[in-house]
């Protein structure tokens, strides 16, 4: 099986953090409500000069440095985003220019909302196989604050801005499994005519979708292997709500420590949440050779994706 191996990661956050008390400037809410319903304590929002593009560039530069590769070694570049600065050029094209990558490589944005990073990983693998390439740079970058209605307390307290990046190598013997899909559903939507509508979300239906999807993806990834969750060192799922993670832990009957969480500090950064978590895990000395990890993304669409890899 041609699988991917992680070579390096990076992350970037805007300078300014907004704690839950700061959100009371915008809407009728409280630290108590946000903390108890979501586990979120703060989020970062872009300020002057900061965008999904600038965050993507910073995260990607760090990931390249950590991988030990030069930009010339990258054979495809994908950016998962729903909140890029421009509809065109893609954020991936802007990043390609900033990193001065080779012109003859596929470069594009992937739109699969919060499952976008894993959709992009799977697309990168397919492109490398199809085109005989070796290395992929995959980025999740979001300026969610651009999509939010700051007078809607149902959504504005839940999201944050940020970017994470990862460099992967295609290797013939790398362990790899993936699943993905969609329900085709409008439970989270942004855009409409002239892209004028901010985010609207049916939180409870997304919640129900998420708590059934995470265990389902994990089980599907393990199906057909000789592995159980005890062979998996980390589960890195999209960081939306601590209660979603707690419910998944209960359904899977797994030790909660196996699920990496950082949503208390960043809130929901959509396609960026998984690569940001990967970067933190590596910084803390995890994802060492031999360690196996499962990633699960879910979100608008309603999309989902899961990938299992071995470091
Ligand atoms: O990447 C995927 C993106 N989305 C998600 O993962 C969202 C999944 N869903 C959720 O995480 C949860 O459903 C929410 C956090 C969005 C909401 O939690 P909930 O426990 O489902 O609350 P609710 O929507 O049932 O609202 C309960 C109450 C309502 O008041 P009433 O009608 O009971 O008087 C809301 O108006 O809480 C109220 N409420 C708030 N109160 C204070 C909603 N947002 C807030 C707020 N502060 N920010």
Image (spheres, grey):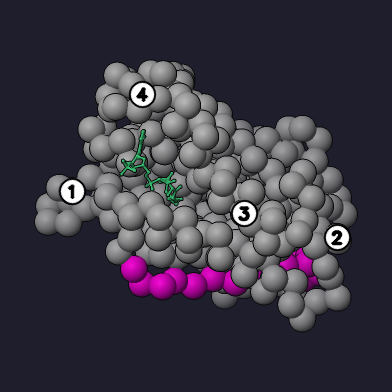
Point out residue 17 in the picture as x, y percentages from the top left corner. 46, 21
Ligand 1 within 8 Å, label 4 CB: yes
Q: How many marks?
A: 4
Asked if residue 303 lies left or right of residue 62, the reply is left
Query: Residue at (44%, 71%) from the top-left corner?
Result: 182
Label 1: which residue? 197
Q: Residue under circle 2?
A: 230
Q: Please tell me which of labels 1 and 3 falls first in the chain.
A: 1
Q: Please provide the residue range marked out in magenta.
A: 170-185
Disc 1 + disc 2, Cβ < 8 Å? no
**In the depicted structure, whether residue 88 falls above or below residue 125:** above
Which picture quadrant has residue 225? bottom right
Residue 189 located left or right of residue 261? left
Q: Nearer the viewer, residue 67 or 153?
A: 153
**Can you tell me which quadrant of the image ligand 1 is in?**
top left
**Which image quadrant for residue 302?**
bottom left
Residue neighbourhood size for the residue with mark 3, other residues' Cα within 10 Å, grouped as few (<14), some (14–19), many (≥20): some
């Amino acid at each position: 099986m041609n699988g991917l191996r992680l070579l390096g990661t990076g992350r970037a956050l805007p300078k300014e953090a907004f704690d839950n008390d700061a959100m009371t400037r915008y809407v009728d809410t409280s630290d108590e409500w946000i903390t108890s319903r979501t586990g979120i304590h703060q989020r970062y929002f872009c300020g002057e000069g900061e965008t999904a593009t600038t965050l993507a560039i910073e995260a990607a530069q760090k990931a390249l440095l950590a991988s030990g590769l030069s930009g010339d070694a990258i054979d495809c570049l994908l950016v998962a985003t729903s909140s890029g600065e421009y509809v065109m050029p893609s954020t991936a094209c802007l990043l390609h220019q900033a990193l001065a990558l080779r012109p003859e490589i596929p470069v594009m944005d992937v739109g699969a909302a919060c499952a976008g990073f894993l959709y992009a990983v799977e697309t990168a693998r397919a492109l490398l196989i199809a085109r005989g390439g070796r290395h992929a740079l995959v980025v999740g970058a979001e300026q969610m604050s651009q999509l939010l209605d700051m007078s809607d307390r149902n959504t504005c307290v839940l999201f944050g801005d940020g970017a994470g990046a990862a460099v992967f190598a295609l290797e013939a013997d790398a362990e790899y499994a993936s699943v993905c899909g969609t329900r085709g559903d409008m439970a989270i939507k942004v855009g409409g005519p002239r892209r004028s509508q901010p985010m609207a979300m049916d939180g409870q239906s997304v919640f129900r979708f998420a708590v059934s999807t995470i265990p389902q993806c994990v089980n599907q990834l393990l199906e057909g292997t000789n592995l159980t969750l005890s062979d998996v060192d980390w589960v890195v799922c999209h960081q939306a709500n601590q209660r979603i993670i707690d419910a998944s832990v209960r359904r899977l009957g797994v030790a909660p420590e196996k699920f990496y969480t950082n949503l208390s500090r960043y809130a929901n950064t959509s396609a960026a949440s998984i690569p940001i978590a990967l970067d933190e895990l590596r910084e803390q000395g995890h994802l060492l050779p031999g360690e196996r990890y499962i990633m699960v993304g879910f979100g608008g669409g309603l999309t989902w994706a899961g990938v299992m890899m071995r470091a």
